[in-house]
Image (cartoon, grey):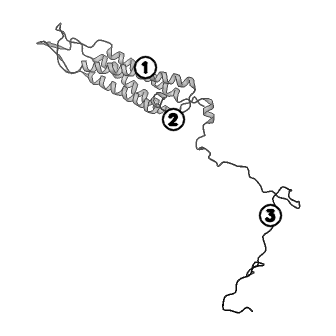
Amino acid sequence: MAGKMDKTTKIVVAVVGSLGLLSTIMGFSAEGTKLTASDVLIGDGACYYPRNSSLALAICAALFLVVAQVIFAAVGGCCGCCKSRTMPSEKNRIIGVVCAVVSWITAVIAFALFVDGAAVNGEGLRETDTFGQCFILKDGIFAGAAILTLAATALGITSYVLLGRQTDAAAAAAPKAGGGIAMGQPQFPQQSPPQWYGQAPPPNYPQYPPPPAQGYGAHPPNQQFPHPQGHAQV
């Protein structure tokens, strides 16, 4: 059936879905372990941010998100614009391209949130603001990035499946596995020469006299050869 997923599609969906799910889980974990106001130390007009696991979690989440999107784009063919694995219907193609574009936009926003949150939660010494306070990452940044990651993964998988689904006509016209494409030589109608068995040829058919019969060693008729000089004619 045209709507069934083949083995390659199942593998791509499993890999991309697993990477997106891992990125989402790490995003929520980073939200739960991010620095709070009580974790930051203030002294002499500077803020000291201690080491925190949310930095590594956010970076890993961003990397898994990028890898998932790159696999989706490489196997899916540039959102269905560079190439097409099959011949999807016009409706599936439009929906698939729209899902792919929205997936990339969502993934870029999620990646930016992960990177921004990781930079704020990095270990180091920073100056206080004009009010003498330390900047703390707002609640929900990592969680929002995780939700966007999940949405981007779901849209990417949807686009990949839709762009790989054949129409009934395309599936019927596709050659069967192992059959290949039959290549043949052009066929031309054979023209047989005119045959008249026991009948006279038509009056307008050109007729040519037969060639003179020449035997082996015989000279052509009425042709004389010169005698060599110095010899008498017999």
- Residue position for label 1: 151
Mark 2, mark 1: which one is toward the viewer?
A: 1
| Mark 2 Cα shell of 10 Å, populated few (<14), some (14-19), many (≥20) | few
Of the numbered discs 3 and 1, the one sitting upstream in the chain is: 1
Quarter of the image with the N terminus in it: top right
Q: In the structure shown, which secondary structural element does the residue marked by tag 1 occupy?
A: helix
Q: Is the residue 21 above or below the residue 143 in the image?
A: below
- Residue position for label 2: 7
Q: CA distance from mark 2 to mark 3?
A: 73 Å
Residue 154 visible at all:
no
CB atoms of marks 3 and 1 within 8 Å: no
Inspect the image, locate mark 1, and give the three-letter code of the amino acid beneath it: Ala
Of the numbered discs 2 and 3, the one sitting upstream in the chain is: 2
CB atoms of marks 2 and 1 within 8 Å: no
Q: CA distance from mark 3 to mark 1?
A: 89 Å
- Residue position for label 3: 208
Q: Nearer the viewer, residue 127 or 7?
A: 127
Mark 2, mark 3: which one is toward the viewer?
A: 3
Q: Nearer the viewer, residue 69 or 194?
A: 194
Q: In the structure shown, which secondary structural element does the residue marked by tag 3 occupy?
A: loop
Inspect the image, locate mark 2, and give the three-letter code of the amino acid beneath it: Lys
